[in-house]
Amino acid sequence: MYQGDPDPDCYPGTSVLRNLLDLRTQDDLDAFEHEAALARSDEPLPIGGLDVRHYQAIHHHLFQDVYAWAGTFRTVRISKGSSMFCYPEHIPAEMSRLFKGLRHTVLESRLDAVTFADRAASFLATLNAIHPFREGNGRTQLTFLAFLAHESRHPLDFGRVSADRLLDALIRSFAGDEAALRAAMVDLTGPTQP
């Protein structure tokens, strides 16, 4: 059996991420992280150019009370189950490529709701596969997606799609099947906006 190196982002002998309150149990950290991010989401969110820097600013805003590294790309390899996310050494280049493409595929043209939903789903699937932060990727993705949808004149109604359905769709997209994510995006977008 191989022993991996200790995780520098976690407290020794645990999988609990180092945090600003020095909470040492996962339950305590999860509860604090949820409350802190929720409170920050009620404040004005960072304004930006819908680029990589803006994305990092959103993550920092949501998680600044929890992690010293909020808004900073991860430096360790991570996976969920058998799914390995983008290696950290490739994150800056992959994020740059993804957000450069965003300008051309979603923002620089007026899209109908279905085309927007299709392109936004593809963007979100890739962003999820990159998983640039150690924690808080999903909440940052959805917050950024709301900015993107507003800018594209296709505001989202998150009340139309359950969190479980979105999570399942993201998991499927990671395996290469974006159909469920596209369908969820169509439902989030609703009827074409004037």
Image (cartoon, helix red, strand yellow):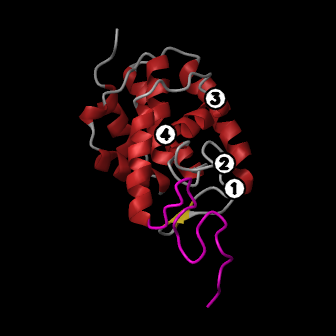
Give the numbered dot on residue 88. Answer: 1
Element type where label 1 sits in the image: helix
Residue 27 position within the rendered picture, expressed as x and y whole percent measured from the top left: 38, 63
Q: Hey, what amino acid is under mark 1?
A: Pro
Q: Secondary structure at mark 3?
A: loop
The residue pinned by badge 4 equals: 141
Determine whether label 4 and label 1 are within 8 Å by CB: no
| Residue 24 within the magenta-colored segment of the rendering | yes
Marks 1 and 3, how far apart in space? 19 Å
Answer with mark 3 or mark 4, whichever residue precedes in sequence. Answer: 3
Of pointers 1 and 3, the one earlier in the residue sequence:
3
Measured in 3D between alpha carbons, the distance from the residue under mark 1 to the one under mark 2, in whole angstroms, is: 8 Å
**Which three-letter amino acid code belongs to the residue tagged 4?**
Gln
Q: CA distance from mark 4 to mark 2?
A: 14 Å
Residue 13 is tagged as none
Which of discs 4 and 2 lies nearer the camera? The answer is 2
Work out whether residue 182 or residue 6 is closer to the camera in this orientation and state it: 6
Pick whichever of labels 2 and 3 is earlier in the sequence: 3
Residue labelled with disc 2: 73
Label 3 sits on residue: 51
Please indicate, yes or no, whether residue 172 appears anywhere in the rendered image. no
Placement of 25 over or under 117, stated as above or below: below
Q: Which residues are magenta?
A: 1-25
Residue at point 55%, 43% (across, down): 127
Three-letter code for the amino acid on which mark 3 is drawn: Asp
Question: Mark 4 or 2 closer to N-term?
Answer: 2
User: Which of the two discs, 2 and 3, sits closer to the camera?
Assistant: 2
Other-residue count near label 4 (Cα within 10 Å), few / some / many at <14 / 14–19 / ≥20? some
In the image, what residue occupies the spot 49% across and 39% down? 141
Q: Residue 190, percent across and down?
A: 29, 25
Residues at circles 1 and 2 in contact by the CB criterion of under 8 Å: yes
Q: Quadrant of the N terminus?
A: bottom right
